[in-house]
Amino acid sequence: MKRFFSWLLIWFGLSTAHGELMEGKCAYVQDGDSLKFIPDGETEEVRVRLYGIDAPEKGQEFSGQSREQLRKLTLKKNIRVEVQDTDRYGRYIGKVYVGSTYVNQEMLRAGLAWYYGHHADSKKDADLQKAQQSARKASRGLWSNPNAVNPRQFREKHGTIHSPR
């Protein structure tokens, strides 16, 4: 019954409570900023888009490395998702943790994602911005290319539209 009401909320585009905490095991990593996990006590996978980051798109430089890094950090591990919102595709937008590791921040620190200020709160997310600045200064990951293209610009240029993964 709980799952039925959760799906109704998603179906009608209503947001889950900000800060709702879900725990479970990561079952699949789609790319560098999206995964699926199975919440404790459930059998159905739930889709999550990592809050505050935007990973390189398929066909874009560092997309494979970004996905692989997220796999190393989360796949088959117990994760916690602090829900921030839901998106138009019904995915939870969340801050993802494995133990005390803030996965979103680690993706930025590794230089394998961009800080996505478009949908984030820059005042509350100084840690994410600092992680990106650190990677950029050290030329880690995508920052090793001085002409790195923001995934949002890449999508605009190539007409790539996010699909409901």
Image (cartoon, grey):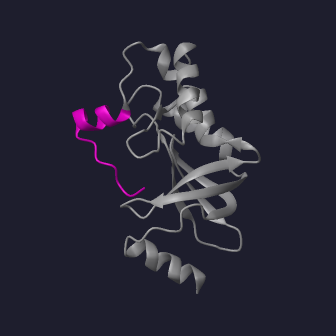
128 versus 2 height, above or below: above
x, y (%) of residue 98? 72, 47
Seen at 30% across and 32% down, the residue is: 154
* Residue 59 visible (yes or no): no
Location of the C terminus (image quadrant): bottom left
Question: Could you say which is closer to the camera, residue 3 or residue 28?
Answer: 3
Seen at 58% across and 71% down, the residue is: 44
Q: Residue furthest front?
A: 123
Seen at 48% across and 18% down, the residue is: 143
Q: Is residue 2 left or right of residue 113?
A: right
* Residue 85 visible (yes or no): yes
Q: Residue furthest bottom?
A: 1
133 versus 108 height, above or below: above
Location of the N terminus (image quadrant): bottom right
x, y (%) of residue 103? 63, 41
Q: Quadrant of residue 153?
A: top left
Q: Is residue 138 left or right of residue 100?
A: left
Question: How many numbered discs, if any?
Answer: 0
Q: Is residue 151 left or right of residue 125?
A: left
Seen at 50% across and 39% down, the residue is: 123
Question: Could you say which is closer to the camera, residue 45 or residue 19?
Answer: 19
Question: Could you say which is closer to the camera, residue 155 or residue 80?
Answer: 80
x, y (%) of residue 91? 46, 60
Whether the magenta-drawn stretch holds residue 155 is answered as yes
Magenta extent: 151-165
x, y (%) of residue 92? 50, 60
14 versus 60 height, above or below: below
